[in-house]
């Protein structure tokens, strides 16, 4: 799996959020990654290495045009 993420990507995590959704939107990148649950709109900030281990797949990649 590519370790390249962009703002606006929709990703599926391995674990369910307590609301029942597995889909998240990436809203900030850096050493920590901020993601928003698409089920309940809760925003969570997690370290990049934990995010990369917890991701299952990229559902929609928002790759910027060059």
Image (cartoon, rainbow, N blue to C red):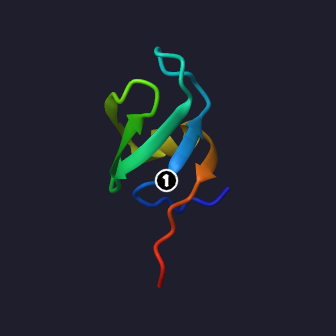
- Res 45 quadrant in image: top left
- Res 56 quadrant in image: top right
Instruction: Name the residue that disc number 1 marks.
Output: 9
Q: Name the outermost residue toward the bottom.
A: 66
User: Are there few (<14), some (14-19), or many (20+) residues within 10 Å of tag 1?
Assistant: some
Q: How many marks?
A: 1
Which is nearer the eye, 53 or 7?
A: 7
How far across and down, in percent of the image, does residue 55 sit? 58, 40
36 horizontally vs 57: left or right: left
Residue appearing at x 33%, y 28% in the figure: 42
How far across and down, in percent of the image, does residue 34 sit? 34, 43
25 horizontally vs 45: left or right: right
Which is nearer the eye, 47 or 25?
A: 25
23 horizontally vs 47: left or right: right
Q: Is residue 12 above or below residue 3?
A: above
Residue appearing at x 33%, y 33% in the figure: 44
Q: Is residue 45 above or below residue 27?
A: above
Residue appearing at x 45%, y 33% in the figure: 38
Q: Is residue 49 above or below residue 37?
A: below
Q: Secondary structure at mark 1?
A: loop
Q: Quadrant of the N terminus?
A: bottom right
Residue appearing at x 55%, y 44% in the figure: 11
Q: Is residue 10 above or below residue 4?
A: above
């Amino acid at each position: 799996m590519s370790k390249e993420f962009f703002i606006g990507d929709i990703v599926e995590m391995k674990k369910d959020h307590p609301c029942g959704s597995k889909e998240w939107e990436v809203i900030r990148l850096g050493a920590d990654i901020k993601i928003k649950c698409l089920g309940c709109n809760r925003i969570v900030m997690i370290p990049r290495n934990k995010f990369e281990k917890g991701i299952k797949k990229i559902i929609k990649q928002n790759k910027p045009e060059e």
